Image (cartoon, grey):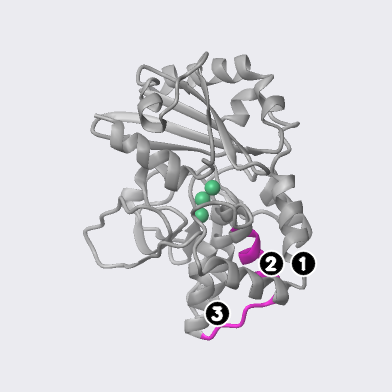
Amino acid sequence: MSINKTLVFGHINPDTDSIMSSLVMANLENQLGNEAKAVRLGNINKETEYVLNYLNMSAPELVSDVADGQNVILVDHNEKTQTAQNIENAVVKKVIDHHTMNFVAPYQLYYRAEPVGCTATVLYKMYKEYDVPITKNIALMMLSAIVSDTLLFKSPTTTQEDRPIAEKLAKIAEVDLTTYGTALLKAGTDLSDYTPAQVINIDSKLFEKGGKKFKIAQINTADIDGVFKDKVYFEAAINDEIKKENLDLYVFAATDILNSNSKIISLGNDSGIVEKAYGVTLDNNTALLENVVSRKKQMLPKILENLD
Ligand code: MG
Ligand code: MG
Ligand code: MG
């Protein structure tokens, strides 16, 4: 792949925001005369597949690493543990994100992170600032990302900016926001094609703090009990990964998108940390976290606070 064409990608184990924002950002760059191409760092999940099918589009090309000197734009992430291999030898031209910042580069770049619910919310504002038209398809991509990241505005990560922008996008995309959004989220709860090892990796993120390595994985469901019928298989898969990757903690969360709760499995030497972090008692490695749906805003910060 040419290193002159800038590659745009989201995080590994990509979610709908990572895929859609890559496509939307690549389009913005191209409209501004900068050659760019969206790629992805992992498998497409069922929710994202729903959007791609809706638009009759194929997924961006899969890559795992980047060439030395490759120009890249990161969307929906900034941390080294969540990006392409060899990133340290690439040239990060831009970062467009909405996560905690854990990024340094020994050169100047365009870095834009806003405390909003979705990368696509930031991209919507950039389209407006650059006066680049938002087509029907681009609108649906942005809308899908916002619905996904905010769980149709039920997540506490939702800000005042996300919903009005989503409403405008739904008009451009010519869809009913609630009908389309509900169908999209529901598509993401289908686990029928996955093995337990795949389920825990649909949306898992690796974090590091003070020599500790831990993962938080999350899936969406409308049937927590149904998911937990396979608990022993998930535990086996999680314990495998803990061993393989030398993790201190692995938290797997099944998030009930209808009732806005999450049930977790916590394993690893530091598994007990979740009791203090979330004020719960583990029962057979599991606990129900009431009113907790967001990894970014609710699950991760409490673990970081309690890790030492
Ligand atoms: Mg994401
Ligand atoms: Mg996001
Ligand atoms: Mg997410």
Q: What are the residue bounds of the magenta stretch?
A: 131-145
Q: Earlier in the sequence, mark 3 or mark 2?
A: 3
State the mark number for residue 44.
none
Give the camera-side residue of 273 and 85.
Answer: 273
Q: CA distance from mark 3 to mark 2?
A: 18 Å
Q: Quadrant of the C terminus?
A: top left
Q: Quadrant of residue 200?
A: top right
Predominant SS of the magenta segment: helix
Front residue (pair 64, 234) = 234
Mark 3 secondary-structure assignment? helix
- Examine the rendered structure and indicate whether residue 147 appears above or below residue 123: above
Q: According to the image, label 3 marks what residue?
A: 31
Could you tell me residue 130's position as x and y percent? 48, 83
Eye-nearest disc, 2 or 1: 1
Give the SS element for disc 1.
loop
What residue is disc 2 on? 140
Q: Which residue is mark 1?
A: 176
What amino acid is labelled 1 in the image? Answer: Asp
Judged from the image, the secondary structure of the residue bearing numbered disc 2 is helix
